[in-house]
Image: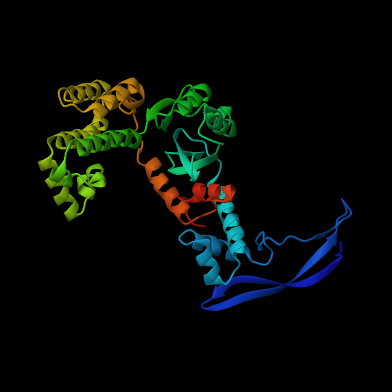
Amino acid sequence: MGWYDRKVRRVRDLSCGDTRIYLELEVRRVDCGGCGKVKRERLEFLADNPLYTKRFAYFVGRRCRGATIKDVAEELALDWHTVKALDMQYMEAQLKRAGTPGPQVIGVDEISIRQGHTYRIVVSDLMRGRPIWFGGEDRSEASMSQFYAWLGEKKSSRIRLAVMDMWKPFRLATNSHAPQAAILFDKFHVIRHLGEALDAVRKSEYARLQGRQRRYIKGQKYTLLSRRENLTLDGKKALKTLLAANKRLNTAYVLKESFGQLWSYEREGWARRFFENWRASLKWQRLKPYEKFAEMIDRHWDGIAAYCRLENKVSLGFVEGLNNKIRVIQRRAYGLRNENYLRLKILTCVLPAL
C-alpha cells in the first residue's frame, strides 16, 4: 500500500546518433509483508543490470554477434565485464524465445575447449538447424548420457536418427537411451579419415624418394587434401604438376575424389557394389593406409549405409559448418575461462537476432 523510500537512478538507454541517452527515474523500495524485508521494486524495462535498459542490453548483445567483447566495450565506453553480462542476458532471452527443443534428427560431435584434450559434447537439431545442448565432462558414454537425461525419456523416444562420427561411446549411449534411433556416421568425418590416409601416402612417398624428386611433394599437403574447385590457380597448377610427377599419389588422389560418390546412391545394394568395386581397385596399388581405411568402412558399414535407407534426406554439412562457427568463436576468445558463456555463444550462434 505504500513504500519504504525512493531514490533517483540514472539509467543508460539507446543512443541517438552519437549522443548517449540517459533516463532519470525514481526507484522505490517497499516493505515486504511476507518476509518483513525491504526490497527494491523490479521494473520490466530494465536489464538484469539495473543501470541499463533492456533494449540497450539487446543492442549490446547484437553487436557482440559480430565483434569481440573488447571491441564493443571500447565502442560504447563500457566496462568489459558489463558488456559480457549484458550479452549473456541477450543470449538467454534468445534461448527462451527459441523454445524447448524436441528433436527428431540429432547431430553429435565433440569440441576441444582448451589446449590439450579437454572435450565437451555439442548436440544439434538437424531438422531445425541449430545446436540444442552443450555439456559433459569429456567425450565418454557417461557424458553423452547426460544429454539424454536432460532431454528426458519421452523426447528421447522421438529421436529417429542420430548423426555422429565413429566414436564408440556416442553409439553405445544412443543405443541405450534411444534404441529406436538409426545411427548414421557423418560423411565429413569419414572423408577426414580418408584424407588422413592420403596424407600418410604422401609422407611415405616423400620418405621413399630422394633428391630432386622430392620437390614436387614438399609443402603440398593441403593442395592434395583440398577439393580441386577450392584451389587457387597456382594451387591447381601445383596439383597438376604433382600428380603428373608421382603415379602413386595420382592414384591415391583419384581414389579419394571418387569415394564421395558413395553418398549419391539411394539404394544400399548399389552403394555396397560401388564400395566393393572401389576396394577392389586398391589391389596391387601398394596403398596400405587406403586398405586400412577400407577395412574400417567395412566394419562400420551399417552406420554409413543408413543414409541410403533415409526417406527424407538430412543435411550432413550442418555439424561441420557448426564446428567452423565454434572455431571462430574460440579464436575471438569468447568465454574460454567461463564455460557457461561459451555454452550460450554456441547455442545461440545460429539463432535470429532479437
Q: How is the image coloured?
A: rainbow
Q: Is residue 38 above or below residue 143?
A: below
Question: Which residue is nearer to you in this view: 149 or 259?
Answer: 259
Left or right? Give the position of 143 relative to 53: left
Question: In terms of image quadrants, where is residue 48?
Answer: bottom right
Q: Residue at x 19, y 26 (%)?
A: 278
Point out the residue furthest to the left here. 244
Residue 67 position in % (x across, y down): 47, 62
The residue shown at (58%, 76%) is 20
244 horizontally vs 6: left or right:
left
Residue 107 vertical position relative to residue 221 in the rendered view, above or below: above
Quadrant location, the N terminus? bottom right
- Up-down: is 180 above or below 44? above
- Horizontal arrangement in the rendering, residue 117 relative to residue 211 (left or right): right
Pick the front one: 246 or 20: 246
Q: Position of residue 110 (x, y in %)?
A: 46, 38
223 and 158: which is toward the camera: 223
Residue 99, given in percent of the width and then of the height, sits at: 55, 44
Q: Is residue 18 above or below residue 186?
A: below
The residue at 67%/62% (across/down) is: 49
How far from the left and from the top, in percent, is residue 234? 17, 55
Compared across the picture, whether 223 is left or right of 343 comes to left
Q: Nearer the viewer, residue 250 or 201?
A: 201
Q: Residue furthest front?
A: 211
Total labels: the figure holds 0
